[in-house]
Structures are given as C-alpha cells and as structure tokens.
Image (tube, rainbow, N blue to C red):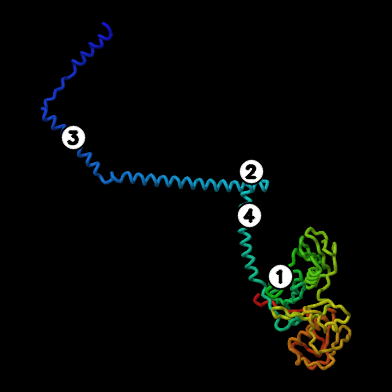
C-alpha cells in the first residue's frame, strides 16, 4: 500500500469515530435567538455613542497635546540658554586664562585665588567699618580756655604733648595738656617721651575737625636710637616734592620731637635716603622748632586765633614783630603801641614809650601780645619783663616781675573723661 492510500484510510477512520452533532431546535427558535442577539448588540452601540465624554474626547486630546508640546519647547529653550550661558562663561574664563597666560592645570589654583579675593573684599569692608568706628572715636581735644599759651602751672603735674597742625603749606605748633591720670593709664611703665606720645595719640587727633589739613600721622615709621630719631620712609612719600612740602615736614618734625638731638631719614631698607633737590642725606641736627622764632597771630576760618612762629630775619626779633609779614603772619602789637627793647642778662626788658593801660585794649589783643612776648623770649632761652604798664597784674600775669616761661603755644586740653 502506498503512503497516500494509508493516509486516506486513517482519515476515514478518524471521521467515523467523531460524535454526531444534532440540533433539535425549530426554525422559529433559531430565528428568535438570532434576532434577540442582534437587537442587544444594537442597543450597546447606541449607549456608547450617546455618552457625553465621547463627543469632547477629541478636544481634550488636542489641548493635552498642545500643553505637552509647550512644556517640551520651554524645557528645550531653558536648557539651550543654560548651555549657552555656561559656554559663554567658560569662554570668558578661557579668555582670562589666555590673557593671564595661565595653563589649564592651574585652573583650580585660580578658583582658590578668586575665593581668596572675595574673602579679602569682605574683610576689607569689615576693616572699612572698623576704620569708620575708630575715626568716630577721635581724641577729644578742645582749646584751652581763653588762653593760647600753656605754662607750667597749667599742667597740674600732667604732660605737655607737643603736636603740629598743617594749613596751606604752613605747620603750626600746638600744645596738648594731658592729665597725670591719663598718662599713668596709657603709660603704666613710666613717663613717655615725645615719640611715645606721638605714637599713642597722633593718629586719633582729628586735624580736619580743628580746621586744618589731614597731614598726620607721618608715612613710614620711627625708631629711637639714643638721642637720634630715625625716620624710615617709603617710596613716593612726597615730603620732598617741593621746598614748601619739605619745610612743612621739617617744621612738623621739629615741633613734635623736640627732645631729640639728631634726625636721620632712611629708606625702608635702612639705606640713607636721597632727598629730592638735596641729595643723599645723612644724620642731621634736629633743632627744636620753637627756637629762635618770632610769634605772630593768625585767625583761622573756624574763628580761632593761633600764635604762629616764624624764623627771624634780623637780630632784633622784638622790633621785627611789631610789623606784619603777610596775611598769615600778622603782628600781635596793637596799633599805636610802641616800646624800646633792652636786655639784662637773660631777661629781655620791654619798656613802653607811653604808660600802657591794658584796659584800653581789646582783652584778647592784650593777652595775645603778652603771650607772644613770652614765647618769642623763650625761643631765645630768655625770660621777659614788661615796664611802664598801668596794671600790676593782668589776668594770670604778674607784671611786677619777669613773666613765666611758657611750655608751648596754642594750648589744647584732652577731655577729662578720656
């Protein structure tokens, strides 16, 4: 038997063994069943078509699509801008590095330096605030009563701090009375010299508030070596720019540091300084700025009148001081007052040609004249006596004998609460 015949025989046997299916329903039953199923299916379709959501579905889908698209575009644009800004910043940093000739390996160091710079700026601001706080607590000094000259009796065991104020290319000496209690508080180890007083108080004195220029403290620093005062100056200090600036420097030094014999100006490295228009300078004599001076008066813009010294041009200083030099140096001798000058040992005797009634003068003018006489005499290491005066005593001056030797001109006093 061939394979095909064998397969056909097997198939016939399989079909003959299958069960016989019969349907005993009538035609009407089959029809009614089919009709009922079709009607049910039609109702479901109508229900689905009549749901409210179905008619709005397209619109909702469209809105959702638009919103989604908007979000995607915004996100893309922000990402793009951030990337652009980052790239721009990176380009700037790269340009900076190229300008500074910095290689990429030192980039981390640059970042540290930038942080350090920012921290330094913050510190500088803090220091600026601190600096403002110090200035607001400047040393409170005020003119010493109506007197302009300080005498030993005025000190009350305190100290005369010799200082200097600068105005329009002139240096004016002042004398600040500091109480014994304040000195003991600030210098518990002993009585201070002029350099110690300067270092303690100079930076706290508000020169501008007193009507003068902001000049002190000096640039550089000082060192005391025996009777020599060394001044270490930085480059570009400006004290030698012109003859006027040199004169202010010299006078200010001599007014303040009057207990030193020599001055030595040095560069910061300790080498002798090359002073412009002078040359290399060595150690020089430091002459007391109140020596061999004639005193004149000057009224400042703030209304205060100062006694100001000026070097003599003749050998007759008391005759010379009867005339004004210029607007800065005006005579203290009132108009119509004349006198003769003689000397008795170390005492200068001023004899008025006509009996002088001090009450006929303005009180301030009479005090200024007497004080200027004593200051001028003291600058020559002499005392002074007035003759042919109506009064035997005038204010604090005993006119029957030689007048007291002044400690310094233009008196100020440090407030007692300091």
Q: Which residue is mark 4?
A: 117
Q: Which residue is mark 3?
A: 38
Crowd rating for badge 2 (residues with CA inside 10 Å; few <14, some 14–19, many 20+): few
The nearer-to-camera label among 3 and 2 is 3
Crowd rating for badge 4 (residues with CA inside 10 Å; few <14, some 14–19, many 20+): few
Q: Residue at x 15, y 35 (%)?
A: 36
The percent coordinates of residue 333 (x first, y second) are 80, 86
Above or below for 200 versus 353: above
Q: Is residue 194 visible?
A: yes
Toward which corner of the image does residue 120 lie, by quadrant?
A: bottom right
* Callout 4: SS: helix
| Marks 3 and 1, the one that precedes in the sequence | 3
Question: Which disc is residue 59 wearing?
Answer: none
Q: Are marks 4 and 1 in contact (CB under 8 Å)?
A: no
| Marks 4 and 1, the one that precedes in the sequence | 4
* Callout 3: SS: helix
The percent coordinates of residue 217 (x first, y second) are 73, 68
Tell me the CA gap for discs 1 and 2: 48 Å
- In terms of depth relative to the viewer, which is nearer, 341 or 381? 341
Tell me the CA gap for discs 3 and 1: 112 Å
| Marks 4 and 3, the one that precedes in the sequence | 3
């Amino acid at each position: 038997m061939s394979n095909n015949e064998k397969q056909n025989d097997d198939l016939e046997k399989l079909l003959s063994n299958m069960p016989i299916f019969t349907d005993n329903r009538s035609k009407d039953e089959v029809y009614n069943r089919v009709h009922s199923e079709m009607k049910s299916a039609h109702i479901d379709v109508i229900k689905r078509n009549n749901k409210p959501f179905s008619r709005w579905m397209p619109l909702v889908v469209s809105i959702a699509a638009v919103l989604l698209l908007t979000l995607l575009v915004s996100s893309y644009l922000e990402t793009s801008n951030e990337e652009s800004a980052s790239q721009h910043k990176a380009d700037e940093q790269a340009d900076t590095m190229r300008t500074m000739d910095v290689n990429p390996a030192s980039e981390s160091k640059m970042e540290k330096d930038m942080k350090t710079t920012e921290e330094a700026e913050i510190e500088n601001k803090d220091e600026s605030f601190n600096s403002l706080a110090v200035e607001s607590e400047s040393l409170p000094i005020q003119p010493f009563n109506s007197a302009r000259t300080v005498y030993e009796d005025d000190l009350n065991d305190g100290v005369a701090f010799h200082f200097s104020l600068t105005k329009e290319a002139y240096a004016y000496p002042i004398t600040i009375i500091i109480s014994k209690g304040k000195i003991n508080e600030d210098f518990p180890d002993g009585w201070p010299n002029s350099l110690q007083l300067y270092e303690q108080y100079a930076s706290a004195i508000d020169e501008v508030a007193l009507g003068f220029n902001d000049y002190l403290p000096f640039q550089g620093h000082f060192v005391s070596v025996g009777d020599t005062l060394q001044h270490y100056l930085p480059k570009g200090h400006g004290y030698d720019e012109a003859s006027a600036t040199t004169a202010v420097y010299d006078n200010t030094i001599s007014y303040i540091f009057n207990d030193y014999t020599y001055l030595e100006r040095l560069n910061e490295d300790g080498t002798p300084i090359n002073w412009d228009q002078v040359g290399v300078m060595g150690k020089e004599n430091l002459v007391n700025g109140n020596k061999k001076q004639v005193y004149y008066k000057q009224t400042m813009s703030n209304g205060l009148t100062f006694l100001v010294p000026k070097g003599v041009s003749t050998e007759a200083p008391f005759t010379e001081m009867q005339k004004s030099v210029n607007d800065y140096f005006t005579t203290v001798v009132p108009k119509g007052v004349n006198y003769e000058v003689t000397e008795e040992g170390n005492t200068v005797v001023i004899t008025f040609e006509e009996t002088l009634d001090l009450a006929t003068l303005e009180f301030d003018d009479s005090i200024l004249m007497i004080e200027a006489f004593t200051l001028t005499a003291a600058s020559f290491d002499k005392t002074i006596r007035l003759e042919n005066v109506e009064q035997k005593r005038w204010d604090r001056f005993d006119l029957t004998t030689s007048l007291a030797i002044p400690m310094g001109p233009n008196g100020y006093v440090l407030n007692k609460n300091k």
